[in-house]
Amino acid sequence: MTSSRRTRLTGSTLLAAAVGLVVVLDTGVVQLPFSTPRPVVAAGASAAPGGGAGSETDPAALQARDDAVAQTLEALSAALATGAPVEPLVAPGSPEVVRALGRLVRNVRAVDGATATVARERYRETTVEADGDVTVQVGMTSRLVASEPLAYDYVYTRFRRVGRQWLLSGWDPVADPNETVPDAPFLLPVDIVAVRRPHTLLLGTVGVERLAARLAGRAEGAALQAREALPQAGWDGTVVVYAFTESAFLDRVFGAHEAGLRDEHPYSWWSHETDTGVLRVVLGAGYVAVDDASSRLGVRRAVGCAAGLATDGMGVPDWMIEGTAEYVSTRSGSGVDPDAALDRRGLDDATWRAVRRGTWTPRLVGAASDNTTAAQIAAAEDSAWLACLFIADRYGEQRMQESWEAVARRRDYGEAKERAAFTALGTTRAAFVRDLRVWTRRLVARSG
């Protein structure tokens, strides 16, 4: 089961270069220099050109049809592996299918090391349509990164008999309504460009390769920073970043007008909790177009949040997850520098005033749903960040990691789980809050 948490980081402006960002759309089929697959022929099938399936009711004819469909799908799997042209697998008069399959092959081939295969779903009955085509549900298994399990998607397809072959005449990928961000993006209606770094795989939009490469470098730095600060047992150090600029994809993930180049919140991001050991982060279009302090902080925070969500355990207090994400985003170099972090991030005005007056009380919540107003959200984010910054400064990052591991080992929920973190630090919640208030007031006082 995949859960997610979404946060937005709003930049005040976008660079003029963002307006000129070009999204290249697929307008046709690109012929690839590979050999053509062998003809797909059903043994015993009629040699007459065209013709429907309605008269084929005997078991031998039906088996011959199913064998021919399977052979076409095997040829498609081979094309996904080799880049062979897909036109010989498509019935005449189906240009939209040629485009869709061509895009699928290109997308899989664009990601070095990725794999994908297709096969008929045996538990689904083949349906004969009025025009003689047959409808077949096809399953696609794929993998983006070698260390993660296979992903699964399915497609509604149509096949038409053409001479002695059964060729594809329809291709309709099914979007899982419960899956906002697919584990395998190959079926998305986008043209993928992939950029690999040692710990990062970035999937972006064709036509903005230079910007995608720049963003991949930022994500790689964030992954290294997060791994150094929080070497989670449930995370293998790999980050997969979706950085598409197509509005159809962005609106599906973030909601309409939330993460595009000219939208109000171009720095929206989404991190996913997974069981694969691979982090998944989705970035709004603003991150592709703009490389400034706000966008770099947002990338680090997204990866840091995902690193927290990768912990081997459920029910981790929300303040620990959010605080870790904030801590990673403001961490500089390999050391802990609270003064530099405060200068880099700042605090909400209400938090700042309360700390200066000595009336500030940390808001360390166990669940994000405990915050229902904008003021509560801002107070909780400040408190979570200050708490983790305090832990790193007072106890060290190794003890911070040990507190994470103590929480992850417990299989219960609520206060007992949070108590394990404080026990690992050798303190209690009450003593921790008291010491945090004193430490924070001194930190703010030093800033002037």
Image (cartoon, grey):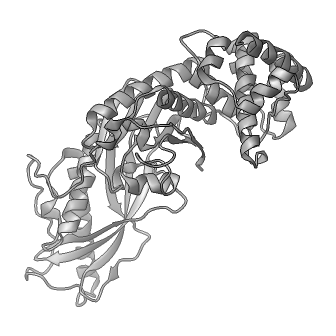
Q: Nearer the viewer, residue 370 or 178?
A: 370
In this image, 431 relative to 44: left or right?
right
Q: Which of 425 and 37 is in front in this view?
A: 425
Residue 199 in the image: state x and y as whole percent: 43, 26
In this image, 306 relative to 25: left or right?
right
Locate residue 329: give its quadrant: top right
The answer to whether residue 7 of the structure is visible from this angle is yes
Residue 354 in the image: state x and y as whole percent: 82, 27
Residue 116 in the image: state x and y as whole percent: 33, 49
The structure residue drawn at horizontal position 42% and vertical position 72%, both measured from the top left corner, is 124
The answer to whether residue 407 of the structure is visible from this angle is no
The structure residue drawn at horizontal position 22% and vertical position 55%, both measured from the top left corner, is 26
Position above or below: 153 against 233: below
Position above or below: 52 against 65: below
Q: Nearer the viewer, residue 433 or 445?
A: 445
Position above or below: 129 against 394: below
Locate residue 167: give its quadrant: bottom left
Locate residue 55: give its quadrant: bottom left
Q: Which of 70 and 296 is in front in this view?
A: 296
Residue 185 in the image: state x and y as whole percent: 39, 49
In this image, 14 relative to 21: left or right?
right
